[in-house]
Image (cartoon, rainbow, N blue to C red):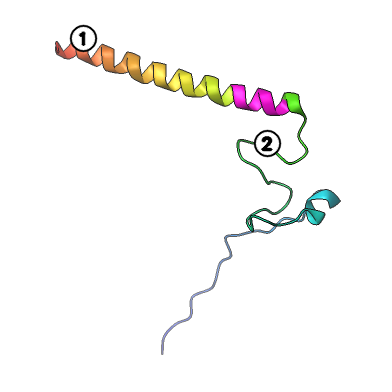
Amino acid sequence: MPRTKPIISVLNEMPAENNVAEKAPSGCGGCSGGTCGAFGIRAGSEKDVVIRNLLLFAIMGIGMLLAAYLIVKLLNIVTGI
C-alpha cells in the first residue's frame, strides 16, 4: 500500500490592501494584490517616483558594467595578457 505524503502549500495568497487593486482589470493575467508593473512602478505612480526608479536601475546597470570592465582589466593585468 503506498503511503500518502502530506501536501504542503508553498503559495500563500494575501488579500489586496486596497480596493483599487481589486477593481483593476486583469489584462495581463498575472497581476494580483496591487503589484502590477515592472521595475517597481505600479499603476497610478507619481511621475517623480517613476523617474526615480528608472534612474536608480540605470545607475545600478552602469555600475555593474563598470565593475565588470574593471575586473576584466585587473585580470588582464594580473595574467599579463
Q: Residues within 10 Å of mark 1 (few under 14, many from 20)?
A: few
* Extreme residue in the right direction: 19
Q: Residue 17 colored magenta?
A: no
Q: Is residue 18 visible?
A: no
Foreground disc of the pair 2, 1? 2
State which quadrant residue 41 falls in. top right
Where residue 39 sits in the image (x, y, percent)?
60, 35
Q: Is residue 67 above or below residue 27?
A: above
- Name the residue beneath numbered marker 1: 77
How crowded pointer 2 is (Cα within 10 Å; few <14, some 14-19, many 20+) is rated as some
Query: The disc labelled 2 sits on which kind of residue?
Result: Ile
> 46 or 14: nearer the eye?
46
Q: Is residue 59 left or right of residue 20?
A: left
Q: Amino acid at mark 1?
A: Ile
Of the pair 76 and 9, the residue shown nearer to us: 76
The answer to which of marks 2 and 1 sits earlier in the sequence is 2
Residue under pointer 2: 41
> Residue lying farthest left?
80
Part of the protein shown in magenta: 49-55
Label 1 near label 2: C-beta < 8 Å? no
**Numbered disc 1: secondary structure:** helix
Residue 53 is one of the magenta-drawn residues:
yes
Q: Quadrant of the N terminus?
A: bottom left
In percent of the image, x 58 and y 65: which residue is there? Answer: 9
Residue 75 % position (x, y): 23, 16
Q: Residue at x 31, y 17 (%)?
A: 71
